[in-house]
Amino acid sequence: MDRKIEGIIAALMTVIWLVLLNVFFSGKVTAPDQVKILPDMRITYIRLEATPEYTAVSYDDVTMKNNSNVISGAIGAKGYHLDSPVDLAVFNTERLIFKHSIRINQNFKFNLPEKLNKDARIKFELLDRHGKMLNQSKPFEVAKWCFLPNKPEAGAVNDFGTVLDRNLSRVGTFNIVEAPKTGLSFLHEMHYNTTLQMEMHKTDVAEDSRLIALGRSINPIRQFATSIMLPTISDNSVNWSSPQGSAIEGEKMYVVYEDSRHKNFGRVVSFDLKKLRLLDTDKTKKNILRVVESRVRKGILIQGDLLTALNSIEVGPYIYTGHGQAFAYNKQTKMFVLTALTNGSAKQIFEQIDPKTLSVKKTGIFDFWNSENDKKVTGERNLAIDKKGNLYIVSVVGNSDVKDTNLKRGDILLYHGKLEHGKLSMSLAKTVVRSKPGYYTQFLSIDESGRLYFLTDGAYLGIPSTKWVDGSLEFSDINMAVYATESGGTREFESQVWEGEKSMILTNRGSELMLGSK
């Protein structure tokens, strides 16, 4: 065959081969790519370009702070052409303020032309070299707690009288029911074994704390396991290290936080459990609120799931809370109720709190009286309200009450009653429960069936309220549980909430919501 013809055929074959290569492999080969040198080819290589394609783009590691112009970190992603440079465009309230070339998954640090303030709303766009947008971030905002208006509704005080009706008559003889002893010493010095640090970081996402019911327990909730880790480090707005009473209404949990600077004052904080549970748990795990908490303290701008988690929290105004443990929701009035001893007095304040504003809507003052001996009864820091609006307060007998020969120090008394027609009236149940499960009284809760749960640190007694009230309580009616961590210690129980039949314990040191399971 003529050499000239052979050359033409070879050239045509090369062109055909290159066309086919471009048709079938364009955009599928990592750039820059190189075609191997073929015999008798005048073209030694050809570089193919394809549009970068990114998946799983993450802006979580980008840091920007309030009152600073520094932006640093890395934008993470998977996909094709990760080594190719892209332009990072930075917008503040839709205004382009900065553009610079970066590489995906590589650290960068730049100075923006302006400082970011608390009202900044930052958005990123990733652009290829032709200016085509590859990805866009959600808006960043400065991380700050969401405060509700600091004003209670006007003209809503002292609307139901100031003195408790005197029908707290004590009966002459007590029906003593021997409750099981715990077998653990809770006296004098509590042993806390938290396994959790006071501040959680992103590296701690696998932390999983558990409380296991010990063998001496009777028909207990078998265990409690970490569900949501709550903030723990106090700041100028909330004393996050001191959660006290809590309650659930709808899909929100409400927690009373005792302030560290102003005695007997604090705030009610709501957590939207639905929002938190809809987050990508594989990505955020259980400590997302502690990640948010850290960024709030540092004034860092956040977006995405972190911003959703932040917006799930609402912080109410300062109110009088006392210690904050006597807290419950009244389904009849659709109000939260909080009772507390007043400053320098044996009188108690009775507050009704609006779930929408987290502020006090109605308030009153009352005394606990024993009509038999015309003396005041020591107020207790616990309160439960059942679905019919019946109120329950548990009182633990102290040294001043043991003059009654039928009573012993540590016996448990139950007061029950209602708030009706502007009067709060309560009576004393005839049955006394002997041997409480722990030293410190922490909380009183009630489930849907009407069973009262009297909490101390690491333990509870479960007692049906109707039988306790009508005097038919027997030993077999009582449930009891004592809990220990896997390392053998216990936790500080602050309060207990119920979602249907599911129970959750709010523990402290560090603060978290733990979900119970049978």
Image (spheres, rainbow, N blue to C red):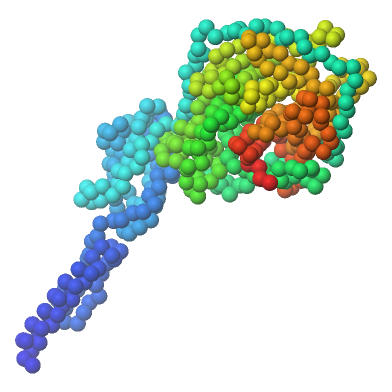
* Viewer can see residue 61: yes
**Horizontal and vertical percent for residue 301?**
42, 35
Whether 45 is drawn above or below 408: the answer is below
Dividing the picture into quarters, in which one does residue 416 lie? top right
Outermost residue to the right:
405
- Across and down, in percent, residue 287 comes to 55, 41
Q: Nearer the viewer, residue 245 or 55?
A: 245
User: What's the residue at 32%, 41% (across, down)?
Assistant: 124
Horizontally, residue 242 falls left or right of residue 150, namely right
> Extreme bottom residue here?
1
Residue plotted at (60% across, 11% down):
363
Q: Is 208 rendered above or below residue 41?
A: above
Q: With respect to residue 165, does 250 lie above or below?
A: below
Is 390 located above or below residue 177 in the figure?
A: above
Quadrant containing the N terminus in the rendered view: bottom left
The image shows residue 423 at horizontal and vertical percentages of 66, 10
Residue depicted at x 29% and y 53%: 85
The image quadrant that residue 501 belongs to is top right
Residue 13 vs residue 503, the one in the foreground? 503
Residue 485 location in percent, x, y?
72, 45
Q: How many marks?
A: 0
Can you see residue 295?
no
With 425 as the anchor, is 299 left or right in this view? left
